[in-house]
Image (cartoon, rainbow, N blue to C red):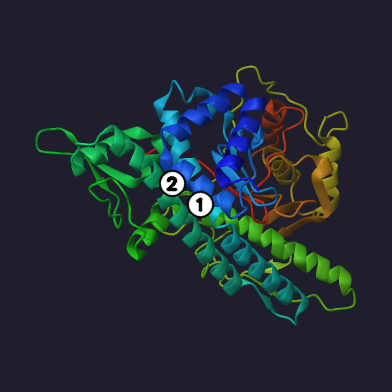
Amino acid sequence: MPTPAQDLEKLLADFERDHALAGANLRELLKSTPELETRMLAAIDKGNLDLIKPLDPAQRARGALGGFDPSDDSIALPMDMLEASARNPQDANTLRMVFGHEIEHSVNKADIDTLVGDFDREVEKIAQGPSPHDYTELLEARNRGDRLRESNDQISGFNVLAAHVRRENPDATAEQMNAKLYASSDQMQQYFDVGIDANGQKNYTPKPGLSIGANGQIAATPDNVEAMGVHFYDRNHYPERYAHRNLSLAYQAEHDAARQHPDRPAPDIRVDLHKLNLPGFPLPPGFSDPSGSVRGPAPGSPSPPSQPAQPASSGADPAAPHPREAGHRDHAYYQMLRDKLPAEVPDNAVAQAMLEAKRSGLDATQIDPNKIGVNDGKIWIGGKTPGFHASADATQAPPMNQIARELQELPAHTPAAPSVGKNEQVQAPAPMMR
């Protein structure tokens, strides 16, 4: 029976055979980062790592940096960074942190599977049970579990890069290490505040609650895990990202239960967005928020992620055809939404919802017509695959001419970019701190 080391060699050889430059650079990265190799061997020993593969280009285009997929026990890495890592230390360091994070997902796959399985069973129990169907406590518990896992695994990724930086700077003081860490990768910058000392020199201090040792490492203490939750998980909008996924699963369970019990009265389906700290978050059709939360983040919190409207380029046609016109390339898509939405929803709001769906990678063929509706002023469009959806505020749509121009600038077929799947972990980049 092969040893973990032999399995690792085969895994690397297979990747290098198909991706010569990226594979050679990955080998060099592991040689200079023994912490990664150690954790890869641990994952292989547990039977949780069988494949290294390129990150889906569509996910990369949307800003993802890596992912662990438990369906085939694979870790996906960004090819552009791997191919540049030998000549670009920043890319190499970002890969150290990202790989260090993702390999912990692989090592801890059993715990992730337990979290996911428990959630799925409880969703099914609520959907099949008597009214009211209140998902609030279950969503709270799932977010706590996700937050704890992601925060611990990000500490591991941080420490992988910190160990490398320390090897390159063995005599650095604690203050110098902070500066070196900050400069090592833009992914490190979210963990430091930058100030100016009495001599006009920059200094770097860990973000509130984070305690970084003299060796540059973060111990996985309760206080540090909570601080990492604030500065990594919360700041990078994991609660919103995972709420979309979890609500989609609940919506699918409700949809299936309704089909199984056609004579059952429609249940009262509730999600208290105030308790989830997600005021105004778009809910699927048929779901209600008993807190009556209004849209807008809590004071001092960052704005939720969104796809900003792309300004019309100088080459855009100011009189671009409208999607409600029969000759428009998206007319059939638009008409499908128009037919399913109430007449009081304005045409420009329907077009805006279609635009947001296309930006999310949902083509007309991927839409489930039974998952199109309006809830609390939000248009909700669900995909045939659980976890794929888009939403738009029906009251905030821009004029049809602007939407038509933005649709014109999109490619005819937007590549499908899946949202975080049922139990796939995808790490998106953190914004750079300036």
**Left or right: where 360 falls relative to 4:** right
Is residue 54 in view from this perspective?
no
**Left or right: where 433 falls relative to 5:** left
Residue 67 position (above or below residue 243): above
Locate the C terminus and report the quarter of the image it occupies: top left
Residue corresponding to mark 2: 157
Q: Decide: marks 2, 1 in contact (CB < 8 A)?
A: yes
Residue ranking furthest to the top: 315
Residue ID at (75%, 82%): 130
Tell me the CA gap for discs 2 and 1: 8 Å
Residue ID at (38%, 34%): 185
Residue corresponding to mark 1: 104
**Left or right: where 219 falls relative to 112:** left
Residue ID at (87%, 68%): 259
Camera-nearest residue between 328 and 221: 221
**Residue 295 place in picture, x, y as percent:** 54, 58
**Residue 78 place in picture, x, y as percent:** 57, 33
Is residue 391 in view from this perspective?
yes
Residue ranking furthest to the left: 198
Q: Quadrant of residue 188?
A: top left
Q: Secondary structure at mark 2?
A: helix
**Left or right: where 162 falls relative to 408:** left
**Residue 124 place in picture, x, y as percent:** 74, 72
Camera-nearest residue between 174 and 106: 106
Mark 2 / mark 1, whichever is N-terminal: 1
**Residue 264 place in picture, x, y as percent:** 85, 78
Residue ranking furthest to the bottom: 130
* Amino acid at pointer 1: Glu
